[in-house]
Structure formats: structure tokens, C-alpha cells
């Protein structure tokens, strides 16, 4: 009976002592800090187009690149950016609010071709957004997207920036 109480007492004290690990740099959750949002100087203008009408092609055998066919526009506001470690790198998850309901095909669009500039990796949170849908409550307009980044790229960067139409969200190392 004494040995059982002793073992339980030692294990509970050891477990209580591990609570400091939560705030240490050794915890992978703390490798990137909390995201911060900043207002942009001028909102990005919307484009007038209908995503349901396909563009005219010269030939049926001619294929366009992905950059030419994606018609997404920047999301109204970016709420937060989270970087989660995974095998071989990390996953950047961004959450934002679109101006209207029904946004789809949400992507983190790389700026500067996905190459870090001065230790800053920049993306734009984009989605295909219809203009004929109601605005609705904020919960129904929330969208999110993710992007895998290799560990070599993560070693080169100190900050991840995600641009929206009206603000910028950053996550620092």
C-alpha cells in the first residue's frame, strides 16, 4: 500500500512539473507565434467577371496554365494564420471572411512565386466569389485554406504574411 501511494505521489508531481513544457520553445505548437492582423492601406478592387462563363480558347487542344484559369479574388478580411508542423515541413492554414456567402475554391495564392523575400513568405487568400449572393452572417462567410511548405523553405523564413482585401495577417517565428 505504501509503495502504491509513493508511486502515485511521485508520478503526479512529475506530471505537474511538465506544465512548463507548454510555453517552451521545444513544444512544436509554439514554433510560430499567434497571428496578428493589420489594416491595409487601400482595399483591393474587385474584378467584374462571371466565373460561370468560360473564356474563349483558340483551339480545343490548347491548355491554359493554372495561373491563367484561376479566377479567384482576394478575400475581404483575413482572421488568422496558423502554421502546423508536419512531416517534411509545415502546413500554413489561413482563415478569412468573404464579403458574401458562397465563396468556393479557396486558395493561398503565393506572391513572388512562393520564394521568401527578406525572410518573409507572402500569400494572398483568394476565392472564387459570386456577386449575386446575399451577405449573410459572418459564420456563413468564413472560409479557410491551407498550403504545404517544405522544411527547407521554413528554415529560410522568419515571418509568414497572408494578404486579404482589407487587412494583412502575419505569423512570426
Image (cartoon, rainbow, N blue to C red):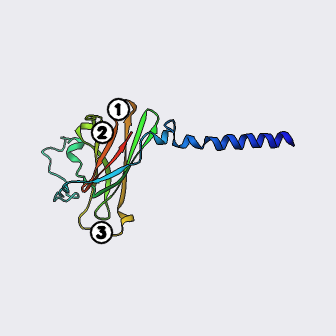
What residue is pinned by disc 3?
Answer: 135
Left or right: 20, with 67 as reference point: right
- For the residue pair 131 and 125, the one nearer the viewer reads as 125
Could you say which quadrant of the image residue 10 lies in?
top right
- Asked whether 40 or 97 is in front, the reply is 40
Crowd around label 1: few <14 · some 14–19 · many ≥20 (10 Å): some
Q: Position of residue 53 (x, y in %)?
A: 19, 57
Q: Mark 3 or 2 closer to N-term?
A: 2
Mark 3 or 2, which is nearer the eye? 2
Kindly check if marks 3 and 2 are in contact, taking CB atoms under 8 A apart as contact.
Answer: no
Q: Position of residue 168 (x, y in %)?
A: 28, 51
Quadrant location of the C terminus in the rendered image: top left
Q: Residues within 10 Å of mark 2 (few under 14, many from 20)?
A: many
Closer to the camera in the image, 46 or 14: 14
Mark linked to residue 153 = 1
Query: In the displayed image of the protein, which residue is found farthest to the right?
Result: 1
- Residue 40 position by quadrant: bottom left
Question: Residue at left 80%, top 40%?
Answer: 6
Relative to 135, say whether 67 is above or below: above
Could you say whether the residue bearing mark 1 is in a helix, strand or loop? helix
x and y percent of residue 56 in the render?
14, 50
Which one is nearer the viewer's eye here, 55 or 108?
Answer: 108
Give the structural element (helix, strand or loop) at label 3. loop
Whichever of labels 1 and 2 marks the residue nearer the N terminus, that label is 2
Q: How far separated are the C-alphas under marks 3 and 1?
A: 38 Å
Quadrant hosting residue 112: top left
Is there a contact, CB below 8 Å, between mark 3 and mark 1?
A: no
- Residue of label 2: 121
**Disc 1 and disc 2 in contact, CB within 8 angstroms:** yes
Amino acid at each position: 500500500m505504501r509503495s502504491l501511494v509513493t508511486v502515485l505521489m511521485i508520478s503526479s508531481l512529475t506530471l505537474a512539473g511538465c506544465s512548463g513544457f507548454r510555453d517552451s520553445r521545444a513544444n512544436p505548437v509554439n514554433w510560430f507565434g499567434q497571428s496578428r492582423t493589420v489594416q491595409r492601406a487601400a482595399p483591393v478592387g474587385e474584378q467584374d467577371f462571371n466565373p460561370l462563363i468560360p473564356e474563349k480558347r483558340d483551339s480545343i487542344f490548347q491548355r491554359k496554365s493554372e495561373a491563367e484559369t484561376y479566377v479567384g479574388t482576394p478575400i475581404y478580411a483575413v482572421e488568422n494564420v496558423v502554421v502546423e508542423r508536419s512531416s517534411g515541413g509545415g502546413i500554413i492554414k489561413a482563415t478569412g471572411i468573404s464579403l458574401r456567402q458562397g465563396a468556393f475554391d479557396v486558395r493561398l495564392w503565393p506572391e513572388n512565386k512562393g520564394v521568401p523575400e527578406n525572410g518573409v513568405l507572402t500569400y494572398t487568400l483568394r476565392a472564387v466569389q459570386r456577386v449575386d449572393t446575399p451577405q449573410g452572417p459572418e459564420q456563413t462567410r468564413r472560409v479557410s485554406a491551407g498550403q504545404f511548405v517544405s522544411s527547407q523553405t521554413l528554415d529560410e523564413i522568419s515571418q509568414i504574411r497572408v494578404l486579404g482585401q482589407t487587412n494583412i495577417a502575419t505569423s512570426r517565428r
